[in-house]
Amino acid sequence: MSSDPWGRVDETGTVYVRTADGEKVVGSWQAGAPEEALAYFERKYDGLVVEIDLLERRVRTTDLSAKDALAAVGHLRQQVDQAHAVGDLEALGRRLDQLTELIETRREERRAARARQAEEARKAKEALVAEAEELAASDQWRAAGERLRALVDTWKGLPRLDRKSDDELWHRFSHARSAFSKRRKAHFASLDAQREEARRRKEKLVAEAEALSGSTDWGPTAARYRELMQDWKAAGRAQREHEDKLWQRFRGAQDVFFAARGEVFAERDAEQRENLARKEELAAEAEKLLPVTDLKAARAAFRAINERWDAIGHVPRDARAGIEGRMHAVERAIQEAEEAEWRRTNPEARARAEGLTGQLQDAVDKLRAQIDKARAAGNTAKAQKLERELEGRQALLDQALKGLREFSG
C-alpha cells in the first residue's frame, strides 16, 4: 500500500483521496506500482489547478461573458466534486467559490456600466433631438443643414436604447429634420419665384435703358438713368445665368449715353474753369467789404458785385460749394450787421430792455436791504438764503445791462 498527505492506494489497487468528509474513492489502478497510481491522479489534480488558473486569468483580463464563465466554473466544479484526482479538493472548491463571486461582481459591474452607458446615450440623444428641433426653425439654411447632417452621423455612433425610447426619440429627431427640409424647400421655391420676377423686371429696365442710350437730353436722361439704377437695385437678383448678361446690357446702355454726354461736357469744362476764375475775383472783392464799417455802402457794393456774379455762368461742380460759400459768408456778415443796427435803433426793444433792467435793479436793491436787515437781527440763516437768491438776480441783471449797452453801441 502507498500513501501521501492527500491520498492512498490500498492492497487491491483502489485509489482514495482524503477530504474533510473522509476518504473518497478516486479510481483503481491495476497496471503498475501504487506510487504510479498516486502520481497519475495527482497529475489530474494539477490539471484541474491549471484549468482553474486559466479560467481565473480569462475572467480578470478578458471580456468573457458571465454566462460562459459560470458554465466553465460549473464544468470544473463537477470534475472536482466527482473526486477523480488526488489533492486538496476543498482548496479547489474554495477557489471556484471565490471565482464565482468575482464573476457575479463583474456581471453587476457590467450591468451598472451598461446602465450608465444607456443613460449617457439617452441624454446624448435627447440633446441631439433638442438641437435638431431648435435648428428646424432656423433660417441659416446652409449652416443648419450641415449641422443636421452632422447630428445624424453623431446619432448613428451612439448605442441603441430600449426600442420604445429609441423609436420615440428618433421620431422627434426625424420630424425636426423633415420640418427643416420642408421650410428650406419652400424658401428656395419662393426665392426662385422672386428671381424669375426680378428677371422680368430687369428685362424691362434694360429695354428702357437701351432706348435712352442715344438721348441728348442730358439732364432728364441722366436723372432717369439714376432712377433706373434704383429700380434695378430694388428689383433684387435674377437667376445667376441671367443676372450677369442683363447687367452687361444695362451697364452698356448707360455707358453709351454717359460717354456721349462726357464729350459734350468736356467742352463745357473749359468755359466753367474760366467762370470760376472770374467768380474767385468777385469773391475776393466782396471779402474786402469786411469788417462792415459803413453798412449802407457795404450793402450797395455787395449788391453790385452780386449782379456781376449772376451774369457769370456755371463753375465746375467740385468747386461750386467752396466759391459760393465765400460769397455767402460775406452776405451773412452784412445781414448780421443789419440786424445789429436794427436792434440798436429799435425804440420798443430799447424800452423793454430798460424796463427789465429797472425791474431787476429794484429787486437786487430790495434783496440787499433785506439781507442787511436779517444780519442786523442776527438771523444768519435767512441772510444766507437771501444772498443765494441775490446771486441769481444779480446774474440776470448783469445780462440785462449787457444787452442794454448794445443799444448805445
Image (cartoon, rainbow, N blue to C red):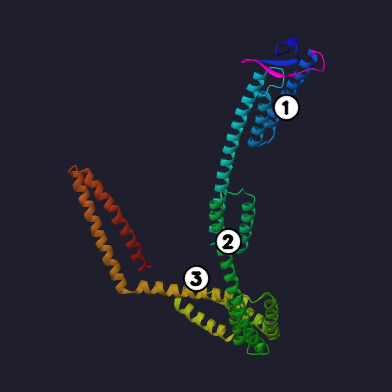
Which residue is nearer to you in this view: 83 or 307? 83
Q: Residue lying farthest right? A: 32
Q: Quadrant of residue 182?
A: bottom right
Tell whether 40 sits left or right of 392.
Answer: right
- Callout 1 amino acid: Glu
Q: Mark 3: few, some, or many residues within 10 Å (few <14, many ≥20)? A: few
- Number of the label disc, if any, that sits on residue 291: 3
Residue carrying label 1 = 51
At 58% from the left and 34% from the top, the residue drawn is: 108
Which of the numbered marks, if any, corresponds to residue 177? 2
Magenta span of residues: 19-33
Quick one: label 1, few (<14), some, or many (20+) residues within 10 Å?
A: some
Can the viewer see residue 284 in this picture?
no
Q: Residue 122 placed where, x, y %? A: 55, 48
Q: Earlier in the sequence, mark 3 or mark 2?
A: 2
Toward the viewer: 192 or 1? 1
**Residue at (66, 26) in percent of width and height:** 77
Q: Amino acid at mark 2?
A: Arg
The correct choice, above or below, for 326 with respect to 173 in the image is: below
Mark 3: amino acid: Pro
Q: CA distance from mark 1 to mark 3?
A: 122 Å
Q: Nearer the viewer, mark 3 or mark 2?
A: 2
Q: Is residue 30 magenta?
A: yes
Report, in whole angstroms, how far the alpha carbon at label 3 lies from the one at label 2.
79 Å
Number of numbered callouts drawn = 3
* Residue closer to the observer: 156 or 303: 156
In the image, taking residue 335 as reference, residue 97 lies left or right, namely right
Is disc 3 placed on a helix, strand or loop? loop
